[in-house]
Image: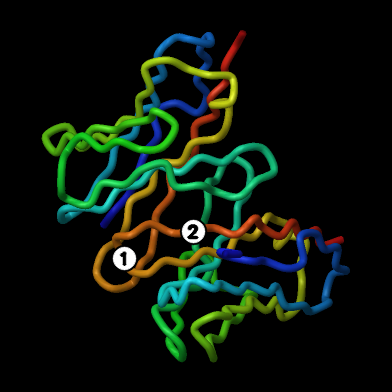
Amino acid sequence: AQSVTQLDSHVSVSEGTPVLLRCNYSSSYSPSLFWYVQHPNKGLQLLLKYTSAATLVKGINGFEAEFKKSETSFHLTKPSAHMSDAAEYFCVVGMGGNTGKLIFGQGTTLQVKP
Amino acid sequence: NAGVTQTPKFQVLKTGQSMTLQCAQDMNHEYMSWYRQDPGMGLRLIHYSVGAGITDQGEVPNGYNVSRSTTEDFPLRLLSAAPSQTSVYFCASSRDSFYGYTFGSGTRLTVV
């Protein structure tokens, strides 16, 4: 069965410093993995996705994530945080097949300090 | 290009009332889903559809009904509202299992 664990519920960084949001997954087959961002009182926006092509995935707004099968991880990174990056981030695994069902992690709140 | 449109944005219901949350997409996506978001619990799947006339239950389907008579619309019906259904509801659509979903802006529902 598929599952996803976000290792930090809250991450705080200073503006201009690197961002690392950690995600581990469990899947019985090669998964589809996604990162979504949710700004306060907004809907969810797709940041990036992994679907068995390149293991290093580049997304919008300078974010990227690396799929590491040996570690069952899909951590999200950004070299330099911006104030506008403050939001809730969700790591998501697709259940595969033709269902289109997604399993969401609990979310990580990113705080960016000036 | 509207994407995924949810109505209403806010709703207050009394316990026992019924209502329908509307969801429409204009991207000709086959896959559509309803999620609820509660603090500290991420998003949980209520019902989903892989095409017109095809629906199935997700993780938390009790108290909710759906139908998919057209590709564009995927309404969520609350049969008899309960305070436990107080939540933010999101509708999403995608062209396939791997593409990634487009989410609506959500409906904030309070049941008193």
Q: Residues within 10 Å of mark 2 (few under 14, many from 20)?
A: many
Name the residue at 48% across, 17% down.
A81
Using the image, determine if residue A16 lies above or below residue B81.
above
Q: Residues within 10 Å of mark 1 (few under 14, many from 20)?
A: many
From the viewer's perspective, tell me whether residue B111 is left or right of residue A71.
Answer: right
Q: Residue at x 43, y 73 (%)?
A: B29
Label 1 residue SS: loop
Subunit bearing disc 1 = B
Check chain identity for marks 2 and 1: say if they share one: yes
Look at label 1 and name its amino acid: Ser
Image coords of residue A70 (percent x, y) = 11, 34
Query: Residue A103 location in percent, x, y?
Result: 40, 54
Q: In 3D space, how far apart are the residues under numbered discs 2 and 1 (Cα atoms)?
A: 12 Å
Q: Quadrant of residue B72?
A: bottom right
Quadrant for residue A74, please give it.
top left
Q: Amino acid at mark 2?
A: Thr
Question: In the image shown, does B111 or A89 lie closer to the viewer?
Answer: A89
Looking at the image, which residue is at 77% across and 72% down?
Answer: B81
* Rendered-image quadrant of the C terminus of chain A: top right
Q: Is residue B6 left or right of residue A79?
A: right
Residue receiving disc 2:
B102
**Secondary structure of the residue carrying numbered label 2:** strand
Taking the image as shown, residue B105 lies to the left or right of residue B26, namely right
Output the chain of dot 2. Answer: B
Q: Which residue is pictured at 52% across the width and 24% down the height?
A: A10
Identify whether A111 is placed above or below A61: above
Q: Specify which label sits upstream in the sequence, 2 or 1.
A: 1
Quadrant including the N terminus of chain A: bottom left
Label ID, residue B97: 1
